[in-house]
Image (cartoon, helix red, strand yellow):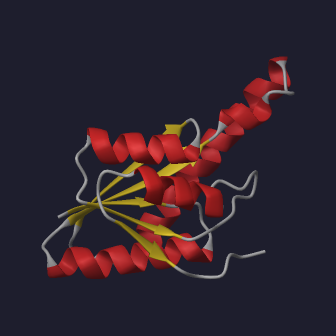
């Protein structure tokens, strides 16, 4: 079973990773962790400021994925990671369909240091439009 897990560093997404591990272990599956950097939110930034913010957001996303992988016991499961850019729900749905994931496991809401990525509306869009099952792990978001 191929499981896609969108993460943003929130408690909700960390709990989604833990749940995905349980499922993958039962089904001899694999996990792909993704995080989405949404540059659309930077419409007001220009020039060097824009470039600096984009660079920092990408670096932060990469650090996030590395920290989750380094701090989590995946119990020998095959784990991939990828930083995507775009609108969160669109990139989650695109990844799920393009790579033919069997399931998406995600938190019900979350946060990012720079911007909220995974709010209820993102989860709702993924649930509504995904072509595979979506398991939503309900956890209060960190404030």
Would residue 143 be found to the left or right of residue 7 on screen? right
Would residue 71 be found to the left or right of residue 2 on screen? right
Determine the image quadrant of residue 85: top right
Residue 62's place in the image compared with 112, above or below, is above
Taking the view exactly as shown, the residue that stands out farthest to the front is 128
On the question of residue 18 being in view, the answer is yes
Camera-side residue: 74 or 143? 143
Q: How far across and down, in percent of the image, does residue 58 sit? A: 61, 40
Give the number of marks: 0
Which residue is found at the position 33% from the left and 48% from the top?
A: 96
Quadrant occupied by the N terminus: bottom left
Q: How far across and down, in percent of the image, does residue 26 sit? A: 17, 82
Would residue 101 be found to the left or right of residue 12 on screen? left
Q: How far across and down, in percent of the image, does residue 21 sit? A: 31, 76
Residue 14's place in the image compared with 122, above or below, is below
Which residue is found at the position 34% from the left and 74% from the top?
A: 20
Which residue is found at the position 21% from the left and 73% from the top?
A: 76
Which residue is found at the position 58% from the left and 55% from the top?
A: 122
Camera-side residue: 109 or 34? 109
Quadrant occupied by the C terminus: bottom right
On the question of residue 83 being in view, the answer is no
Would residue 29 be found to the left or right of residue 88 on screen? left
Determine the image quadrant of residue 27: bottom left
């Amino acid at each position: 079973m191929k499981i896609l897990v969108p993460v943003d560093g929130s408690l909700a997404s960390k709990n989604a990773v833990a749940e995905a591990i349980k499922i993958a272990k039962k089904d001899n599956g694999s996990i792909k962790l993704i995080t989405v950097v949404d540059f659309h939110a930077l419409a007001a930034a220009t020039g060097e400021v824009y470039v600096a913010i984009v660079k920092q957001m990408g670096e932060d996303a990469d650090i996030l994925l590395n920290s989750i992988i380094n701090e989590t016991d995946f119990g020998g499961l095959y784990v991939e990671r990828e930083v995507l850019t775009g609108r969160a729900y669109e990139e989650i749905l695109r990844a799920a369909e393009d790579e033919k994931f069997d399931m998406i496991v995600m938190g019900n809401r979350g946060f990012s240091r720079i911007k909220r990525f995974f709010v209820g509306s993102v989860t709702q869009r993924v649930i509504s439009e995904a072509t595979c099952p979506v398991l939503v792990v309900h956890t209060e978001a960190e404030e």
